[in-house]
Every structure is written in C-alpha cells, then in structure tokens.
Amino acid sequence: MAKKYVELAKKVKCQIIKGSFQFGDKLPSLRLQANTHRVSIDTVQAAYAMLEEQGVIASKPGSGYFVDYIPELESTELIQSPTKVSLQHAVLKVLSHCTQSRCSLGIAELDSALLPTAQIAKLMKRHIRYSLPELLKTEFSEGEPSLRAAIAKYAIQRGIQCMPEQVTVTAGAQDAVLLALKAIAKPGATILVQSPCFPGILQLIQSLDMRVIEVENDDVGHTFVAALRQVLMTVKVDALVLVPTLNNPDGTTFNLAQRKAIVDICTTHNVPIIENDIFGDLHDVKTRLPTLMSLDQSGQVIYVNSVSKSLGSGFRIGWLITQKYHQQIKILKAFSNVSENRLNQRTVADLLSSGYYQRHLTNLKQALGQQRNLYLSAIAKYFPQQVRVSDPQGGYILWLALPTNIDSEALLERVVANSVCFFPGTLFASDLSYKHFIRINMGAPFDAAIEAKLKLLGHEIKALS
Ligand SMILES: Cc1ncc(COP(=O)(O)O)c(C=O)c1O
C-alpha cells in the first residue's frame, strides 16, 4: 500500500484535475487538511512538498499553498487503496437535523404536492375494498405477480428484455443494492463506487464489512472511465456499484460511449455491476441513454430501481433484475424480510401497467425543470460568486462547491437553528474530500419560505468565506 503522503498527494491532485480547486486557488491549510484527512501535519507537509516538486502547487511564504498548474489526467494516479467506511453516526446526525428543522432542502425527496396522491388513494381504496383479506396474508414469492409482470414490461423501455421471474421486488433501491451486494460478495470484499457517492451505498458497504474504492469523477464522466480501466488492471475488485444517470449528489450522467466502455471493462475483468437506475426516469432527455444492463451480453449486470424518486419513498417499493444471480437473491430474500407490503405493490403495479406512471413522469419532469430554474436563480442571487453549482440534466438534486475554507458540517450547525438544513459533503465519501461541498434537495415547489432559507444560507456562506 502506498505511503500516506503519496495517497494524500494523489487525492489533492485529483481534486485539482476535476476542478475542485482551480488555477490560483489557495489550498486548505496544513492543519485543516490534516483534520480533513485524519493524518498528521507532517503527512500533509510531505504531500504538499511532493506536489510542489511536480509543479502542481506553489507555496507563497506567509500565505500558504496555491494551485500553480492543472495537470493532465494520468489515470494511474487516481487509484486509491480499498478503505473502510465509517459514516453511520454522521448520517444519523444529519437526518435528525433534517427531521427537526422540517427543511425540505435536506433529504432527497419529492414534496407530496408533486405526487399523484389522489390517484394513489383511489387505487388503494379499491384494493382495500375488494382484496383486503388476501392482502393481509403472507406472500411467499419474490413479489406480487402483477407487479413483477408490470416491471418486466416497463423494463423493455429501458432496453431490458426480461421475464417476470427474473424480477425481485424489494423494499426500495437501498434494499435491492443490499441484496445484490450480499449475493455477489462476502465480508472483506472490495467494492468500487463513483465518487462522490450516495451515503446509503457507503453505509451498506460499511454494514457488510466490505471495503470501498472510490473513483473520482469529473462532470463529464471521463475521469471515472479512465481510472476504472486502470484500477481493474491492478486491484481485485469484487463488484462495481454505479448510478449511471444523474448520480446523487453531483448529477453526473455517463454518455453512450462511456456506458459501453464501463460494461466492456467490467466484462473483461469479470466484475459484476450493480446498476442503480433510481434517477433514470427523471432524466430530461428526448432519447434516453441505454441502461448498462441493455448493453451487457454476459449477465454481469444486476439492475436496480425503485419508485422512491418518482412516486414517494414512503412506498418502500423497489426491484432488481438479474438472471445470473437470481437464485442467490431468492434465498437471501426468503430468509430476510420475506416480502413487501402487498397493498403498496399492487398500487404500484396498477400505476405502471395503466400508463398512468408515464403520464405522471411527463408532468413531473416539466414541473421539476421549472422548479430547478427558480432554485438556481435564487442561488445565483444570494450565494457568493465563488460557489460552483452542478448542472444536472434532470432530477432535483444540486451539488455545490463552496469556498475551500468552509467546513460544511460547521455551516450546518450554524443554520439548523434557523430551520435550514442540507446534506454536508462529508457524507458522500469515506474521507473528508468533500468537506466544502453541500447537497441541496429541490424536491419541494419553490416558494417564499424556501427563498428565505436559501437567502439565509447564502448569507452564512458569505460570512464564512
Ligand atoms: C443513488 C440512490 N440509491 C438509493 C437510494 C435509496 O432509495 P430507496 O428509497 O428506494 O431505498 C437513494 C435515495 O436517495 C439514492 O439516491
């Protein structure tokens, strides 16, 4: 394993390549960097000296270190060693802040105003009226037949040809990723993810006692593909977990060539892919990009999705599709939570199979597009100019890079008393690389109360800048 300072130098260099620090930007002080990466000041000094020698950064006596040159991508330098994650306490603390503050900018979810609640209520009432005794019985299968059939039919639109028997219904996408990881890998396994990564996935890896390799990405996906090729040539990886469309939090979407390359590279190295398509339905494009599963000939891809981002996460209905790992997953499911709520399954089945879901998506995407513009205008108005904001082509999540001296957790502590919440960047990696980033949820219609919260947040960021 590389020495700590070499690892840190690679990390800082990578952050410079992907634009977290621009030409002329001041780097975090030795002390801040040491706290951030949980290393000694000597280690930071050695890492900075290494980067100075390479001409990437320069020191100005009495002022600190500054970016002096933006290096070209050398994918070998992006490889990190597998590490353990320990984020659970931090995530629980932020979730509790979000609940207490009742602020919609925190948890990534849609406001009920954007959900088809009347239609859901109508369908549920009908099922309760006509099928309640049956719905209260245990279901020993991998999901309601009507839902598995509706999902298999729906999957065709994502280029996936599958039989209902290949579909397993789960308690959301998180549960689906859990089952997939358990089916593929054992404790101690190495799981590769894109970075930044949704904290739920990092927590799963932690709870299964696995290790993670986080591969940094740039806005256009190029860094990730180059590094993936390099990592798989040098490290034994047991699975790749990927959100190829609108990654949470940075919104990255891989293009067709990148998708093909990812599938090819993983097939060559025999690495199973867990494709998490949870935001796929919210991508604002006329022609949707193919799923990794539709590009795969080897059966290495397990496809995961849920209705959490489009119909409400309280449904707790998700699914996975696989042929190769189906048997292991069937056993894992039978001996874990047995089955999901049957009323919810039948309601989702109705929505999918009647075409209602498609119409809902068209309206939802339009509303979200308008909403996003309002949020972006408010951020442009109230946040300092140095703040860089992601440009997601759909969905309702924004990823913001604040001035590098800002500690997003400290910022959260300052604003939470005023009922403002967000997810600090520290939750999206096993280390503190994204300490000065924040994620904002735009799932609630923009109104005066949200504008006031963004104004206050912008004011605090300015005060700390
Ligand atoms: C990438 C990703 N995966 C999984 C989940 C969890 O989804 P579910 O509520 O369906 O379990 C989320 C929720 O934000 C997510 O963003």
Image (spheres, helix red, strand yellow):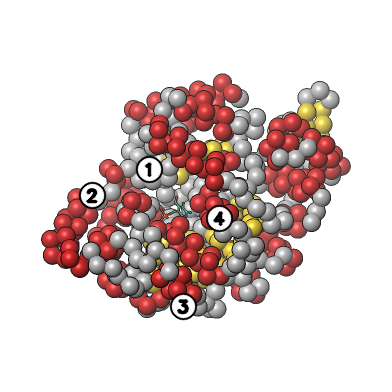
As drawn, which residue projects farthest toward the left?
129
Q: Secondary structure at mark 2?
A: helix
Q: Position of residue 172 (x, y in %)?
A: 40, 58
For the point 32% across and 45% down, the residue is 367
Mark nearer the viewer, 4 or 2: 4
For the point 72% across and 56% down, the residue is 81
Q: Quadrant of the C terminus?
A: top right
The residue type indicated by label 2 comes to Thr
Residue on which disc 2 sits: 117
Q: CA distance from mark 4 to mark 2?
A: 34 Å
Residue on which disc 3 sits: 327
Mark nearer the viewer, 1 or 4: 4
Q: Secondary structure at mark 1?
A: loop
Residue on which disc 4 sits: 207
Q: CA distance from mark 4 to mark 3?
A: 23 Å
Along the viewing direction, whichever of 341 and 150 lies nearer the viewer = 341
Q: Position of residue 286 (x, y in %)?
A: 39, 59
